[in-house]
């Protein structure tokens, strides 16, 4: 394509943090009217490159050109005013403010004091932006009353208020169900049809293949595939470019079910629900729990782990406990990874080692004092096994990438004394292909060692490479159970309700 089609060109980009070289001679070419996927494992340099593009980080070397002219941004605000609009996985919205006020945030930023209120955007314009992303919500409603998926779409709608030349979408579908993701993709395509260039970061190959026109792959801070047509590269080729490994195969079939370990009976996701749902996970088995956002699948999984109160009966290895009593569940050997690692999982300011050892403090302390040498002896081999990068157990959890933070939660599970079962909610959400592979291997090893494992995920690819059988939840009830060899089409039908339970 001619150079005149280039909306944004980054060449020779380099960035070093102390002794760590995040980028070295990276290149990225975004063209008007096209969606461009940026791929790479954690540590490849994706996050640093995106931060440079949106003005959050200044490169040590290299050049940015926007619409053919040299550009340099000293802040995210400068990049936004130039037409580079970021949409992040972790929302930059204000839950306490109304939908209208959130949509007016960029305009409000230009005012101050008593005059700021006069800069609220016209309600008809705000409703128009919402309509473009398929949302019909009350402008006066507090943003915090919306679902996570709806809030993500509000952030996309806010981007429509700007003269958006380059839209940067960083894991934008993490909180969206299939219908909301489709609406988002439709909005992106309409923007691109009007000349916008879109940069799309996702770890889901099905999304990438559905939306992207071009692809760039980073590895070790360098560009190894540069602005190639995505249809010319298979998943295997892209995976190999990222880390030199192939796509995971389906798990081996279980010869026979062992004894039941984790048992839940009579779950009711709503007070008015009749009957209840029963779930049993056997020793050595990985059960995949699937459901669209709002189906109740994650609630059911949290209930099984003792992290969600509700009616019904729970037991592990024959020992009963009360739903909602997470402390008792952990004492009985049920490990748990919540869906939102930032809000519910990590202690961001504690070290990586301490984030793991919190599940075993009672065994590592004597007379109320934590024995640091025993902590390191017990925890550090787990961190090495899960390939924590960088290998710095004393570093704060907040300094690690998303994939390595997720490894800490998996390691915390494995460190639980008397471990019998693992309940994992979205265990690889927002992590790269390398971290995903490490986490999947750890899950398989746990099952092979005789643990009962339940994985609740909205990622069908993850289900199909991990699970020995599938449970599908709709409307807070178990709607279908499918065998390991069920085709993807059958899973999709069960999720949408187009097949009989």
Image (cartoon, rainbow, N blue to C red):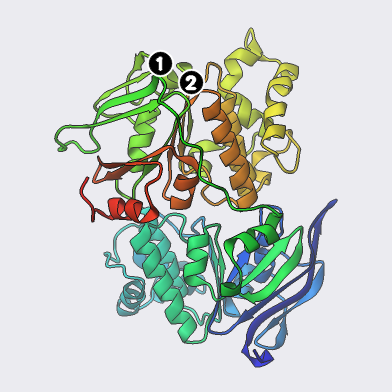
Packing grade of label 2 (10 A; few <14, some 14-19, many >=20) is: many
Packing grade of label 1 (10 A; few <14, some 14-19, many >=20) is: some
Quick one: SS at disc 2? loop
Q: Residue at x 68, y 90 (%)?
A: 3
Number of numbered markers: 2
Quick one: SS at disc 1? loop
Q: Is residue 305 left or right of residue 44?
A: left
Above or below residue 398? Residue 36 is: below
Mark seen at residue 486: none
Mark seen at residue 317: 1
Q: Is residue 335 left or right of residue 216?
A: left
Quadrant location of the C terminus?
A: top left
Residues 281 and 159: in front is: 281
Q: Residue furthest top?
A: 367
Task: Where is residue 382? Give x, y as percent.
Answer: 67, 29
Res 183 → quadrant: bottom left
């Amino acid at each position: 394509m001619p150079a005149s089609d280039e909306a944004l060109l980054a060449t020779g980009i380099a960035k070093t943090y102390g002794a760590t070289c995040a980028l070295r001679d990276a290149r990225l070419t975004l063209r008007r009217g096209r969606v461009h996927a940026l791929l790479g494992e954690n540590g490849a340099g994706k996050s640093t490159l995106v931060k440079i593009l949106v003005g959050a980080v200044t490169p040590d070397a290299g050049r940015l050109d926007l619409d053919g002219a040299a550009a340099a941004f000293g802040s995210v605000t400068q990049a936004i005013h130039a037409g580079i609009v970021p949409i992040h996985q972790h929302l930059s919205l204000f839950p306490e403010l109304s939908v209208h006020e959130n949509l007016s945030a960029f305009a409000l930023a230009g005012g101050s004091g008593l005059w700021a209120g006069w800069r609220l955007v016209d309600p008809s314009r705000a409703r128009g932006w919402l309509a473009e992303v398929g949302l019909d919500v009350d402008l006066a409603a507090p943003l915090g009353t919306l679902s996570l998926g709806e809030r993500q779409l509000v952030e996309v709608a806010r981007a429509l208020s700007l003269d958006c030349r380059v839209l940067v979408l960083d894991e934008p579908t993490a909180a969206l169900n299939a219908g909301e993701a489709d609406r988002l993709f439709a909005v992106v395509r309409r923007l691109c049809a009007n000349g916008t260039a879109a940069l799309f970061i996702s770890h889901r190959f099905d999304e990438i293949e559905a939306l992207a026109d071009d692809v760039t792959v980073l590895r070790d801070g360098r560009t190894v595939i540069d602005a190639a047509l995505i249809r010319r590269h298979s998943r295997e080729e892209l995976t190999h470019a990222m880390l030199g490994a192939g796509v995971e195969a389906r798990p081996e079939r279980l010869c026979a079910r062992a004894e039941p370990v984790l048992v839940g009976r009579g779950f009711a996701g709503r007070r008015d629900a009749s009957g209840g749902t029963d779930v049993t996970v056997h020793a050595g088995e990985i059960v995949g729990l699937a459901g669209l956002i709002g189906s109740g699948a994650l609630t059911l999984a949290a209930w099984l782990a003792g992290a969600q109160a509700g009616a019904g009966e729970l037991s592990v290895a024959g020992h009963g406990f009360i739903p909602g009593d997470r402390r008792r569940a952990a004492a009985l050997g049920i490990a748990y990874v919540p869906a939102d690692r930032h809000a519910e999982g990590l202690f961001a300011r504690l070290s990586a080692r301490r984030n793991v050892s919190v599940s075993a403090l009672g065994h590592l302390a004597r007379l109320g004092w934590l024995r640091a040498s025993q902590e390191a002896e017990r925890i550090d081999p787990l961190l090495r096994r899960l390939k924590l990068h960088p290998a710095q157990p004393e570093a704060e959890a907040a300094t690690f990438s998303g994939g390595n933070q997720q490894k800490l939660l998996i390691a915390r599970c494995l460190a639980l004394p008397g471990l019998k079962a693992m309940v994992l909610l979205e265990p690889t959400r927002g992590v790269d292909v390398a971290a995903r592979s490490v986490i999947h291997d750890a899950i398989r090893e746990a099952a092979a060692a005789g643990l009962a494992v339940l994985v609740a995920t909205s990622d069908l690819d993850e289900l199909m490479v991990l699970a020995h059988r599938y449970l599908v939840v709709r409307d807070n009830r178990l709607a279908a159970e499918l065998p390991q060899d069920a085709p993807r089409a059958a899973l999709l039908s069960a999720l949408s309700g187009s097949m009989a339970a």
